[in-house]
Amino acid sequence: MEERLSEHFSLKEFCLSQTAVRHGINNVPNELTIAKMKALAVNVLEPARNILGRPIRVSSGFRCIKVNRLIGGADSSQHTKGEAGDLTCDDNAELFSIIYHNFEFDQLIWEFGDDSEPAWVHVSFREGKNRKEVLRAVRRLVTSQRKF
């Protein structure tokens, strides 16, 4: 039987990484990291799903240092510690609002998208040490000064 982090979230889905698969990397967390993933699932993800009343998909959960480096992430990323997840559902703005208004979290990030809906929602949770930091990630258009 598959190990569960909570009723609706599995360890397998939280560790699934196409980057790891493509590069043959074993993206498996240790027991301490799994405990942190369970804390995130139990304290934020599962209750948010219950309020939303619909499935939430983990698009990126745990990433070992090697995988995180390959995608350009910082070694200090909470994804590498099992404390963060990138989430999507049928209404990412509603999911963001539910988490913001109802739960303790360390960081909550409106990731890209537009003013009406993020492309995904990043949330992190640390047992007893949450900053309640709310951020927005935006893409910047870089233009060349070169004349064509």
Image (spheres, helix red, strand yellow):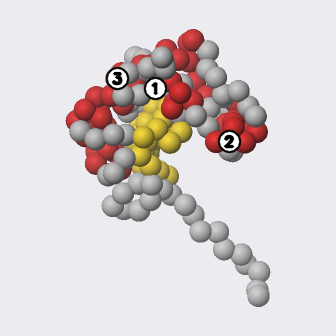
Relative to residue 89, is residue 54 drawn left or right? Answer: left
- Whichever of callouts 2 and 3 sits on the residue coming sooner in the sequence is 3
The amino acid at mark 3 is Glu
Is any atom of residue 76 visible in this view? no
| Residue 84 placement, left or right of 101 | right
Check disc 3: other Cα within 10 Å, few if <14, some if 14-19, many if 20+: few
Quarter of the figure with residue 75: top right
Placement of the C terminus among the 4 image quadrants: bottom right
Amino acid type, callout 1: Ser
- Which of the pair 12/116 is nearer the observer? 12
Residue at mark 2: 19
Q: Position of residue 10 (x, y in %)?
A: 46, 26
Q: Mark 3 highlights which residue? A: 7
In the picture, the disc for residue 10 is: 1
Q: Is residue 120 above or below residue 148?
A: above
The residue drawn where x is 66% and y is 74% is 143
- For residue 141, which numbered disc appears in the image? none
Q: Residue at x 37, y 47 (%)?
A: 89
Report x, y in % for residue 141.
59, 68
The reply to whether dot 2 and dot 3 touch (C-beta < 8 Å) is no
Query: Mark 1 falls on what kind of element?
Result: loop
Q: What x and y, as percent, mark residue 130?
A: 41, 25
- First along the sequence among labels 2 and 1: 1
Q: Residue at x 45, y 31 (%)?
A: 124
| Residue type indicated by callout 2 | Thr
Real-space CA distance between mark 1 and mark 3, rounded to the nearest whole angstrom: 8 Å
Q: Secondary structure at mark 3?
A: loop
In the image, is residue 57 above or below residue 50?
below
Q: Secondary structure at mark 2?
A: helix
**Residue, x 33% and y 40% (percent of image)?**
55
